[in-house]
Amino acid sequence: MSTGLIIALIVIGAVLVIALAAFLALRARRTHGGSDLRRRFGPEYDRTVARHDGDTKAAERELTERLERHGDLRPQPLDPARRERFEARWAAAQELFVDAPRAAVSEADHLLAEAAEARGYPDSGHYDDQLSALSVHHAEHVQGYRHVHRLAHEPDGQDGTGRGAATEEMREAMVEARELFEDLVGAGAGGADRKGSRGI
């Protein structure tokens, strides 16, 4: 055999070994992907499976796509003045809730969108993409944003029962959404003030 042929066979063998190793690694990753995804997404994993009518493969494909699109996103810090403005607006929305629950929910929806955008998540004009990115980085609390957004964009009296959302449902949505808001603005982190964060 010529030296060139021997080198070609060695190169082909090495490529085949690398391809086989990559295939096995990918297969092992997919086999264990469900438990990793469940651990990373927590309640969001279960909601996604439910939305896919129990089809875990479809749900895991969706969650994997979210990770691939948004997993490398590094949220930007907020400067203290901007954080304080967000916190003041949230406190005002909570106070508004007493007299105008629907307006308060709408303001909470806007605040979450703006705070997410300020941190570097997709802009507020692309709710689905923004929610997808938030679910990767704030899986435990993203349901609050989803709940507030649904109520804020639901025409009055059109909740499927022939009546508007009850005040108690709106209150629960605000409380749920507050957790994500606090994650986004860093309320309580590094000594930041939590003023007004427990008002409702």
Image: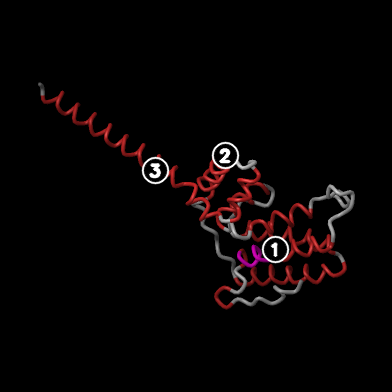
As rendered, which of 107 and 154 lies closer to the eye? 154
Instruction: Tell us which disc is closer to us: 2 or 1.
Output: 2
Q: CA distance from mark 3 to mark 1?
A: 37 Å
- Residue in the picture at 47% in, 46% down: 33
Please state, as top left, top right, bottom left or bottom right, where the C terminus lies in the image: bottom right
- Residue in the picture at 64% in, 72% down: 81
Q: Which residue is mark 3?
A: 28
Mark 3 closeness class: few <14, some 14–19, many ≥20 residues within 10 Å: few
**Quick check: is 166 in the magenta stretch?**
no
Give x and y (percent) for residue 188: 60, 74
As rendered, which of 125 and 39 lies closer to the eye? 39
Give x and y (percent) for residue 99: 87, 68
Figure quadrant of residue 176: bottom right
Query: Quick check: marks 3 and 2 in contact, CB under 8 Å?
Result: no
Answer above or below: position of 130 versus 190: above
Range covered by the magenta-colored residues: 178-183
Kind of residue sitting beneath label 1: Glu
State whether the magenta stretch is mostly helix, strand or loop: helix
Residue 30 as seen in the image, left or right of residue 116: left
